[in-house]
Amino acid sequence: MHSDFLALLFILLCALFVLLLLWAERREWRLGIWLFKPAASGCFVGLGVAWHVLGRHHFGPWAFAALIFCLLGDVLLIPKEKKYFLMGVGAFLLGHVAFIAAFLIGFSMINWLWVLAALIVEALFIFFVMKWPWSEVPKEFFIPVNIYILVISS
């Protein structure tokens, strides 16, 4: 199958699975959530395959690993138990660390002045905007959630 057609197929399937997931979430249909959430996330991985991400320079394996970790994170966030929540946040954390590595490896010329400016804006956002959600985070999740916020914002 041609990679452009395959990519379009994964994009359309992802949209369909997300709509089905939203429907299952609204009806609180657990089996539907277990079916459609991994299917939607699996489409991201499929899109990475269709776009030959693994063969893209040195950043490809990092980007593909990020997609896999994010798929795992989505699956781990389905159960309602706290231990799975923490594992899901950890998987997303590793996924976003892999995305950061892919971007840093993929860009041979980074303007570090812009990176510094972005980090300042991020720090201001986290300090001023995130004060409200922080009060809602249970104490045992405070450190993991804040590390996650910092990494995903990066």
Image: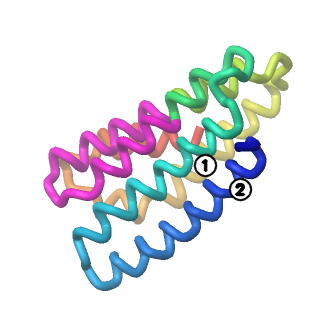
Residue at mark 2? 8
Q: Where 114 falls versus 44 (above or below)?
A: above
Of the residues shown, which amino acid type is indicated by label 1? Leu
- Seen at 57% across and 23% down, the residue is 62
| Magenta segment boundaries in residue numbering | 67-95
Say which residue label 1 marks.
124
Residue in view at x 39 percent, y 64 percent: 36
Callout 1: helix, strand or loop? helix
Direction from residue 109 to residue 105 in the image, left or right: left
Q: Is residue 89 above or below residue 10?
A: above
Quadrant in the rendering for residue 52: top right
**Residue 17 location (% of width, % of height):** 48, 67
Residue located 43% across and 59% down the image: 131
Relative image position of residue 14 (x, y in whole percent): 56, 61
**Is 119 one of the magenta-colored residues?**
no
Please state which of residues 13 and 87 is positioned toward the viewer in this rendering.
13
| Percent position of residue 125, x then y | 59, 53
Cα separation, mark 1 vs mark 2, equals 38 Å
| Quadrant of residue 80 within the rendered picture | bottom left
| Label 1 crowd (10 A; few <14 / some 14-19 / many >=20) | few
Q: Is residue 97 above or below residue 27?
A: above
Whether residue 75 is in magenta: the answer is yes
